[in-house]
Each structure stands twice: as structure tokens, then as C-alpha cells.
Amino acid sequence: MKFGILVTEGPYQHQASDTAYQFTKAALEKGHEIFRVFFYNDGVNNGTRLMVPPQDDRNLQKNWTELAEEHQLDLVVCVAAAQRRGVLDASEAKRAGKDADNIAPGFRISGLGQLVEAGIIADRLMVFGD
Amino acid sequence: MSTLHTVSNSPFENNAFKSCLDHVTAGDTILLIEDSVVGARKAGSFGKEIGKALANCRVCALAPDLSARGIAADTVLDGIELVDYGGFVDLAAEHERTQAWL
Amino acid sequence: MSDIEAPDAEGGVVKKFMFVNRKSPHGTVYAVESLEVVLISAAFDQDVSLAFLDDGVFQIVKQQDTSGLGIKNFSPAYRALGDFEITKLYVEQEALDERGLTADDLMEIMYEDEDDDYEEKPSVRVVGRGELSKLMSEQDVLLSF
């Protein structure tokens, strides 16, 4: 079965991203397909590579990036929500005249149409928020 | 054509859980995740609200969330089934749709 | 419905999408960012509806004035939904009652019915909790923020 995943909260403040990650991992272990993981609202903050949690805490961005590498997941950060919150890739940073970008490996920035498309193509769309 | 409802907020904090209970259809399943599991204690005042839902719905709770909050399985309201993340995935696959009460 | 094998592209598949709005506007970003997804969804030719329940009913009350907040008032955008062929806005009667509101407190949100000589019709439909629950149980995709 094809799942689409929507994450609407940032890392650490809420458990939503952790639960979405555990769900995604469990779905993959069961042989399901993850069509896309879409990060929206404060969820876009899961996609910054600049987070530096303490050594004994989990690194949510790294968890997602590694899961994406292992299973060729499509991790998409909403462009409009990301711009508002300062999550940028190199081309967005250049366009906005910013001196740095921070998007993490394995994540890409794209439009909200990617979320609607996930709703259309996936058999189930799961929403993880607060 | 049943629905899996996920609830993530404590019923003592806001009305998401209550609103979910008010909108379920007979034959649906409610899955308690994250902070919502604090409502599942049989000695707690929200237990009887969940008890009413059990009359025509299945109610499950994510075991890792219970454990994380120090809620032992034997203190959970009778009738609530405990699942792990794999069980969560199975529930999502078995139901036609999932509705998250945020 | 939801078990249709979708083609690689979204071509041809029409699913029932419902946006479930339960939160007051302005205090959090959920209402406005939900509306942004609604507007994008219009481009995909899906069967889109919106539900307003609990504090979500405040998203479409009239005379919202955010000038004292320094936050943009996005509420006029709901009135444009008809132009995007989004014409089903379900509002729960019980949610209105609990908050001391009536249908008259809501914005006039209209659409032109192209199947009825472009007659102007209201997009807002006040429904009881039972009917709203039934509508929710008939969706393919439920998006809540």
C-alpha cells in the first residue's frame, strides 16, 4: 500500500515528527511504499541541517535524511512555509538575497501541489501534527 | 467504509479528543497517540467518555506512548487495545481513511 | 473509492478531499496555511470541500479586523473560493450554537452555478453534527491542520 505522510509541526517542540518518523519506519519494514513525506507549517523546520541537538538526544533531521537515503524517500518541504520560517536551499537563498542556505541533504523544497498530489496518488494520507 | 481517527492531545488540555468522540461513526476505530494516552487511565475522569465510545467503536492506544508516560497497561481502561507502531500502520491500512484530530 | 489505483500522474483521478478546520484564525497559523492548500487544490480538479467545526467557525465570521494585531487579515480570501470552483463549505450548527453564533454572523460566501445559468448561490451550508460526521466518513482524504 502507498502512504503519504504530512508533518505539520517542527522538531522537538512537539512529538509529531517523531511519531511520523516511527510510523514511516514501521510502514517500510512492513513492505509498504511511502510515496512522499511532506513538511508543512512549522514542520518545515525538520529540514534544516543546522540543528545541533545534544549528543544524547536524537537528531530528527539526520533520522529523516538517513531513512530517505536508505529507502529513496521523497522528503518535500513546502516552499512558501519554508521561506516564511527561513528554511532555504541554495537557489532560494540566492533569489532572496540571503547569505546562506540550510536545507538538509535528502530534503527538497517544492510547492504545495506536491501535498495535493500525495493525497491523490497515495492510498492513505496520514497527518501528524498537534 | 470505516475511518481510523487519531487523537494526539490530552483531553485535559483541549477539546480535540472530545470532538473526535462526538464525530465518530459506529464501526470506526480511535487510536490514542502522544499526549492523548493520558486520558486512557481507567481511574481517570475521561475513562468514562472513552467507555461510551467503546459501545460502538474500537479504541486502541499506542503502547510506546503509554510507557513513555509511566502508564502501566493494567491501569488502562478495559477494552482499549494496545498497539505498537507496526500495529498503527496495520490500522491505517485496514481503514479506508484516517482523520487526525489536532 | 480510496482504493482506486491512481496512475503515475494525477490525470483522471478525482478524490473527495475535505479540509477540516477546527481552530480559531490568527492565534495560530493553521487557518491561513490550510486555506493556502485549499487554493492550490483547486488546480487539481478534485472534489474539494471545507468543514468548519469547533473554533474553526470563527475563520469565516464577518467583520474580522486584524489591524490592531499587525497581522494580515486573510479572511476576504474565503469569499474568492467560488472563483476557484470550491463551493462546499460545511459549518456545524452545534459549533455555532456553543459559541453563541448564528449563520447571520458568517461571511456571505457565494458562487456562480454554471449549471444553473450562473445564478449566485451560497457556498456556506450549515449542517448538524450527525450530517457533518457522515460527510467526513465519505471522504477519501481528510486534511486537518
Image: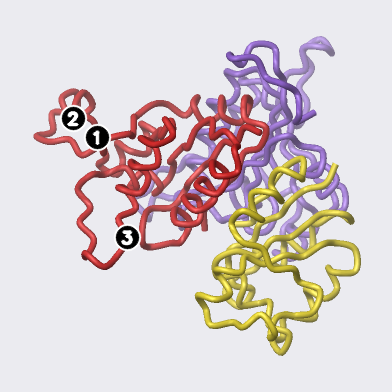
Chain colours: A red, B yellow, C purple
Q: Which residue is mark 1?
A: A88
Q: Are marks 1 and 2 in contact (CB under 8 Å)?
A: yes
Q: Which mark is residue A93?
A: 2
Q: Residue at left 12%, top 36%? A: A100
Q: Which numbered mark, 1 or 3, is in the foreground of this view?
A: 3
> Tag 3 or tag 2, which sits nearer the N-term?
3
Question: Few, some or many C-alpha atoms within 10 Å of disc 1 (few <14, some 14-19, many ≥20)?
Answer: many
Q: Position of residue C126 (x, y in %)?
A: 80, 45
Q: Quadrant of the N terminus of chain A?
A: top right
Q: How many marks?
A: 3
Q: Identify the residue at the far left of this view.
A: A99
Query: Mark 3 Cα within 10 Å, few/some/many (few <14, many 20+)?
Result: few
Report the side of B62 relative to C16 (left or right): left
Q: What's the amino acid at mark 2?
A: Ala
The image shows residue B38 at horizontal and vertical percentages of: 61, 77
Counting residues from the start of the chain, the first of labels 1 and 3 encountered is 3
Q: The residue under label 1 is which amino acid type?
A: Leu
Query: Which image quadrant is residue C8 in?
Result: top right
Question: Which numbered disc covers residue A58?
Answer: 3
The quadrant holding residue B47 is bottom right
Does C9 appear above or below B100?
above
Taking the spot 73% from the left edge, 85% from the top edge, the residue there is B42
